[in-house]
């Protein structure tokens, strides 16, 4: 967050960004959707450790290997999963 420029964010969104940073939305069990124009800082703000495409690949591989419950249990220990660019993941019936 040290490099995120809050001045680039509309004034009415600054409080929402602060809620993301302090994690208060987790206590309220709220889902968060971030959308905006390209270059507006969404990815910078929602930077995730594992890109969405890799997470989906891991889940599909676990399903194929009959280990999906193990992976889901591993993910369930986290209070929050931030998934960026889910709309860009190629989708099929799986």
Image (cartoon, rainbow, N blue to C red):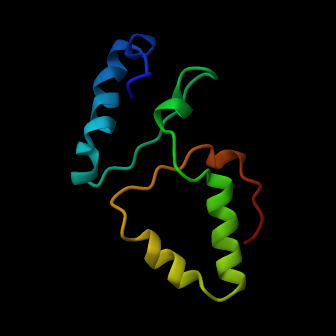
x, y (%) of residue 60? Answer: 69, 73
The one nearer the camera, 83 or 44, is 44
For image coordinates 39% across by 10% down, the residue present is 7
Q: Residue furthest top?
A: 7
Q: Position of residue 58 (x, y in %)?
A: 65, 69
- Furthest residue toward bottom: 66
Quarter occupied by residue 23: top left
For the C terminus, the quadrant is: bottom right
Q: Position of residue 69 (x, y in %)?
A: 52, 84
Taking the spot 45% from the left edge, 12% from the top edge, the residue there is: 8
Residue at left 62%, top 43%? 85
Report which quarter residue 74 is drawn in.
Answer: bottom left
Image quadrant occupied by the N terminus: top left
Percent position of residue 76, x then y: 40, 71
Left or right, 81 with reference to 56 = left
Image: 78 above or below 11: below
Which one is in front, 81 or 92?
81
The residue located at (44%, 22%) in the rendering is 3
Horizontal relation, residue 72 to residue 94: left or right: left
How many discs appear?
Answer: 0
Left or right for 72, reference 21: right
Question: Relative to 46, does residue 15 appear above or below in the rendering?
Answer: above
């Amino acid at each position: 967050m040290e490099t995120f420029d809050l001045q680039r964010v509309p004034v009415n969104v600054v409080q929402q960004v602060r809620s993301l940073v302090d994690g208060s939305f987790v206590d309220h069990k709220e889902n968060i959707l971030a959308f905006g124009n390209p270059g507006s800082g969404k990815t910078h703000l929602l930077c995730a450790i594992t890109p969405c495409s890799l997470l989906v690949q891991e889940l599909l591989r676990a399903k194929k290997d009959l280990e999906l419950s193990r992976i889901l249990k591993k993910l369930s220990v986290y209070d929050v999963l931030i998934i960026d660019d889910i709309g860009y993941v190629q989708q099929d019936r799986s």
